[in-house]
Every structure is written in structure tokens, then in C-alpha cells.
Image (cartoon, rainbow, N blue to C red):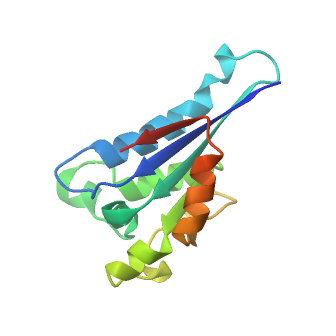
Amino acid sequence: MATTKLGFIVQRPPYKSENPKLALTHAIASQSVEIYLDDGDLVTADIAFVGDGVLNCIKDQKAMELYDLSSTESHIKMALLLDLNVLVCKEDLEKFGLSESDVVIDAEEFGADIEAKVVPYDEISKMMEEQNHLLFF
């Protein structure tokens, strides 16, 4: 029984690029590979928002209303619904004058049991050290 750990590190802001949303899409999709794995093998995904990437986590986005696009917020909530570990860098939030109350923390309306965590960068660094594969977006 083997577990492959994937770490998705989002460093870019949600503007002028699809990269941050692609990170979430790939992390979510990684959970559907079980049909190709040997019995007992697993793939886990952790997502961390650092630097300008924390701006992706701002809640109450209006992407669907304004642009008819699914929002990064809804992607974060889908990741939580799948029990993915979502980390947001506390120091970077503070750099932008944001707090935990400004970002997506839960997905109760979808029935998610876990919440995103606002953590110091040291905890994100520790998470990155534990991964088999790191992907930067």
C-alpha cells in the first residue's frame, strides 16, 4: 500500500491567469485516479496559498454573476468537500491587510466536514517537505 502525496503551491494572484484555478482543478481531479491504482494505493493532495496567491482565497467573489465563470471560491469549496488539506499563509494575508474572516474557510453549504486553515509559513514549509511531488502555480 503506497500513498503518493501531491503538493499544490499557489503563488500567483487570481488576475490575468488561470494558473491558480488550474492548481485547484488538478488537486480536485487527483482524487479521481483511484480507478487506476492498485488496491490500497492512495493519492492525497494538499493545497497551499502563499504570497500573492492568498488573494485567490478572498470570499464573496462574484465571478458567476459578473463573468458567467465558476469562481476560485467555488473551487476552494469543492476541494474542502473532497477533504483536501487547504492551507493559507497567515503572514501573507497580514501583508495585504487581510484576516481569516476575509477568506474562504468552510463549505458548509456543500456539506464539507473540513475547513481551510490559516497557518504560519513554517507549517506550509513542513507540509511541502512531506510531499512526493510539488507543483507550483
Kindly identify the residue that appears in the image at 45 percent across and 49 percent down.
9
Numbered-mark total: 0
* Quadrant hosting residue 120: bottom right
Residue 71 visible here:
yes
What percent of the width, then of the height, locates residue 133?
A: 55, 34
Kindly identify the residue that appears in the image at 61 percent across and 35 percent down.
132
Q: Which of 136/87 is in front? A: 136
Image quarter in which the N terminus is found: top right
Q: Say left or right for 112 vs 9.
A: right
Q: Say left or right for 52 vs 87.
A: left
Q: Say left or right for 60 vs 113.
A: left
What percent of the width, then of the height, locates residue 31?
A: 61, 33
Q: Which of 114/20 is in front? A: 20
Kindly identify the residue that appears in the image at 62 percent across and 57 percent down.
126
What percent of the width, then of the height, locates residue 35?
A: 67, 17
Kindly identify the residue that appears in the image at 49 percent across and 65 percent down.
88
Residue 108 visible here:
no
